[in-house]
């Protein structure tokens, strides 16, 4: 698995019941069509999507996010930069957690200064600005990667509501 495999799976999840094509994912995420195809193949091998690549294995994805994400793709907040809020600084967690420390994905057109969190793929900030539901998924993932126990617990509950 590669970090952007999670991005691809969560983009599909954000689409809900809407049909999707690999070329649409490629355009919306800014990831090449061949990388999308390889990503789906890896996810099928990992049993995170069905063999025909049409149905997400939502419980398996949730299990991986809850128990594996922070170990496989860890990150630590870095220097203060301008960017787009993530983790507990972005919806839906920003509605429940009040914190003076903001976490952001570095992004030149961002409006918030905070500690830098590297996104799972460099194109994530742009893709999130175009899709609020996808943005919530990615921010919740970052809460699992860098958050404290309370943030992680709330993030898991929010992911369960959205995925299952």
Image (spheres, rainbow, N blue to C red):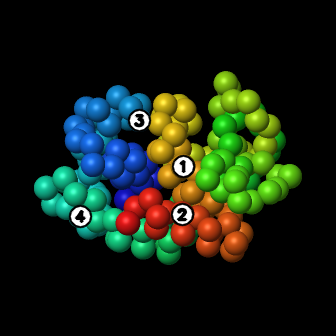
**Would residue 95 be found to the left or right of residue 141 on screen?**
right
> How much space separates mark 2 and mark 4, taking CA atoms?
27 Å
Q: Horizontal and vertical percent for residue 66?
A: 50, 71
- Of callouts 1 and 4, the N-terminal one: 4
> How much space separates mark 3 and mark 2, taking CA atoms?
23 Å
Residue named by callout 3: 29
**Would residue 42 be found to the left or right of residue 80 on screen?**
left
Q: Nearer the viewer, mark 1 or mark 4?
A: 1
Quarter of the picture holding the N terminus: bottom left
Instruction: Answer whether labels 2 and 1 touch (C-beta < 8 Å).
Output: yes
Q: Which mark is residue 45?
A: 4
Residue in the picture at 78% in, 43% down:
114
Quarter of the picture holding the C terminus: bottom left
Instruction: Answer whether labels 3 and 2 touch (C-beta < 8 Å).
Output: no
> How much space separates mark 3 and mark 1, taking CA atoms?
15 Å
Q: Horizontal and vertical percent for residue 56?
A: 28, 59
**Would residue 155 be found to the left or right of residue 85 on screen?**
left
Decide: is 111 above or below 4: above
Residue extending farthest top: 109
- Of callouts 3 and 2, the N-terminal one: 3
Q: Horizontal and vertical percent for residue 40?
A: 26, 51
Instruction: Answer whether labels 2 and 4 touch (C-beta < 8 Å).
Output: no
Instruction: Answer whether labels 3 and 1 touch (C-beta < 8 Å).
Output: no
Mark 2 Cα shell of 10 Å, populated few (<14), some (14-19), many (≥20):
some
Instruction: Answer whether labels 1 and 4 touch (C-beta < 8 Å).
Output: no
């Amino acid at each position: 698995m590669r970090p952007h495999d999670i991005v691809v799976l969560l983009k599909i999840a954000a689409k809900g019941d809407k049909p999707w094509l690999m070329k649409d994912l490629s355009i919306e995420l800014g990831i090449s069509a061949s990388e999308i195809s390889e990503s789906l193949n890896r996810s099928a091998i990992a049993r995170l999507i069905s063999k025909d690549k049409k149905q997400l294995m939502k419980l398996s994805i949730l299990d991986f996010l809850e128990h594996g994400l922070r170990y496989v793709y860890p990150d630590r907040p870095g220097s203060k930069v301008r960017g787009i809020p993530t983790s507990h600084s972005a919806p839906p967690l920003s509605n429940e957690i009040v914190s003076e420390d903001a976490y952001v994905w570095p992004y030149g057109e961002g409006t918030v200064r905070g500690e830098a969190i590297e996104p799972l793929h460099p194109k994530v900030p742009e893709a999130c600005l175009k899709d609020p539901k996808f943005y919530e998924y990615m921010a919740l993932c970052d809460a699992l990667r860098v958050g404290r126990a309370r943030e992680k617990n709330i993030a898991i509950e929010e992911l369960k509501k959205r995925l299952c």
